[in-house]
């Protein structure tokens, strides 16, 4: 019998790549997704890659009764990996209650009912946004957590605090929170990748959509930062490496290797690239010329963010395998495949 893993948000960008990784490593997967920012077609894409179609439960995790009954139905699961959340920074500034309601109520419901059903392992999608504007670089897990700039970011901080409180009770919960830096890239097959609804907020989908002619021009938000070329620096990580880190975290929980009931890890590569460096790499890797212009800073953007990845390497026995060119090439392959699907 395969071990069953519940993956919330499994039709989304990082969730779907993690589902592929889990199935390829002989886990049975149940996806819970409300499809609010994803597509059921992702199930076909996962099946095409793995040969297995995961079970799918179309429910809204804010719904207490439905969440309770889904956890009862799947109470033979051994862990929950929780991706399902709203993630658009600017939207969260406009609609804070929508973000707090969605991201926190769903988390509370999941935790309550998984514990009730005796499912004690939990992996959480957190973000480097909890470090705010860090004074010390590279960022280790010991860096101070700051009040994030957006309600979206704050839901991640509050969620970690909820976990911190919960593991102190007799809940038996074992949790790992993974703080992502900037996930980009797509599955090497070209069948799975990021599919933003509407106008993308993030850099890489905006670049690929501009190169594909869907967007007219990329706006580079500011070139007056104190960085090598004036544009902000980020730690971009291949989504497949990120997915693999979830598998490693899961194995750590299942093998009971945890040293404390809540462990926190940075997931990045340790390398920082500026926006202009990403654009240049994109142009070189894809042999295209990108239409872009420098505009004013985007409110809330931090100058430099990159991870110290030592802890994840040591404790999760994990290291990124893909470099920036592979991240960019796979993003572009996915965008081109999407175009051909139309
Ligand atoms: N960025 C940009 N133009 C865009 C989107 C993003 O210049 O259309 C920049 C943004 O200012 C930041 C970097 O790209 O410096 C990464 O932004 P993204 O939204 O992808 O991730 P964030 O680091 O904000 O979570």
Image (cartoon, grey):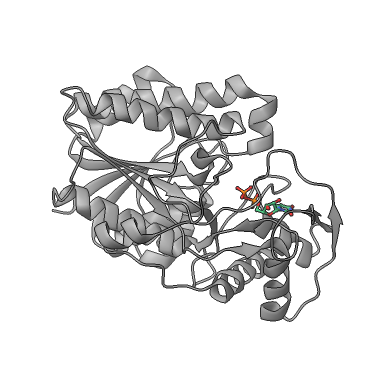
Q: Is residue 171 left or right of residue 298?
A: left
Occupied quadrant, residue 317: bottom left
Relative to the observer, which residue lies in front, 300 or 293?
300
Looking at the rendered image, the quarter that the C terminus falls into is bottom right
Relative to the observer, which residue lies in front, 164 or 223?
223
Occupied quadrant, residue 46: bottom left
Q: Is residue 57 left or right of residue 102?
A: left
User: Do we see residue 8 in this rendering?
Assistant: no
* Residue at the image position 66 percent from the left and 24 percent from the top: 95
* Residue at the image position 43 percent from the left and 47 percent from the top: 179
Q: Is residue 42 left or right of residue 284?
A: left
- Count of numbered badges drawn on the protein: 0
Percent position of residue 166, x then y: 27, 25
Relative to the observer, which residue lies in front, 95 or 198?
95
Quick check: 107 above or below 205? above
Percent position of residue 260, x then y: 20, 40
Percent position of residue 311, x then y: 32, 56
* Residue at the image position 30 percent from the left and 57 percent from the top: 247
Occupied quadrant, residue 74: top left
User: Do we see residue 318 in this rendering?
Assistant: yes
Q: Is residue 315 left or right of residue 153?
A: left
Percent position of residue 259, x then y: 18, 45
């Amino acid at each position: 019998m395969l071990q069953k893993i519940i993956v919330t948000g499994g039709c989304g960008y990082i969730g779907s790549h993690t589902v592929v990784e889990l199935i390829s490593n002989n886990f049975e997967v149940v996806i819970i997704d409300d499809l609010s920012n994803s597509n059921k077609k992702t199930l076909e894409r996962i099946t095409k890659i793995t040969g297995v179609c995961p079970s799918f439960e179309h429910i809204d995790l804010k719904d207490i009764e439905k969440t309770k009954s889904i956890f009862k139905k799947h109470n033979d699961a051994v862990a929950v990996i929780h991706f399902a959340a709203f993630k658009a920074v600017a939207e969260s500034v406009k609609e804070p209650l929508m973000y707090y309601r969605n991201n926190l109520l769903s988390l509370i419901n999941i935790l309550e009912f998984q514990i009730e059903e005796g499912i004690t392992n939990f992996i959480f999608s957190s973000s480097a946004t909890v470090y705010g504007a860090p004074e010390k670089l590279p960022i280790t897990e010991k860096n101070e957590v700051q009040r994030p700039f957006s309600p979206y970011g704050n839901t991640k901080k509050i969620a970690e605090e909820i976990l911190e409180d919960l593991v102190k009770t007799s809940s038996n919960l074992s949790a790992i929170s993974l703080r992502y830096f900037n996930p980009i890239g797509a599955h090497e097959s070209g069948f799975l990748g990021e599919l933003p609804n509407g106008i993308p907020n993030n850099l890489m989908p905006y670049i690929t959509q501009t190169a594909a002619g869907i967007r007219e021009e990329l706006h580079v938000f500011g070139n007056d930062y104190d960085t090598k070329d004036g544009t902000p620096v980020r730690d971009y990580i291949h989504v497949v490496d990120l997915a693999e880190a979830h598998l490693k975290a899961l194995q750590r929980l299942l093998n009971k290797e945890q040293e404390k009931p809540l462990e926190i890890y940075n997931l990045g590569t340790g390398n920082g690239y500026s926006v202009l460096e990403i654009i240049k790499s994109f142009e070189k890797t894809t042999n295209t010329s990108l239409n872009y212009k420098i505009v004013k800073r985007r409110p809330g953007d931090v100058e430099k963010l990159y991870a110290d990845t030592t802890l994840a390497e040591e404790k999760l026995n994990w290291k990124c395998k893909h470099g920036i060119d592979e991240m960019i090439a796979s993003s572009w392959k996915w965008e081109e495949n999407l175009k051909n699907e139309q």
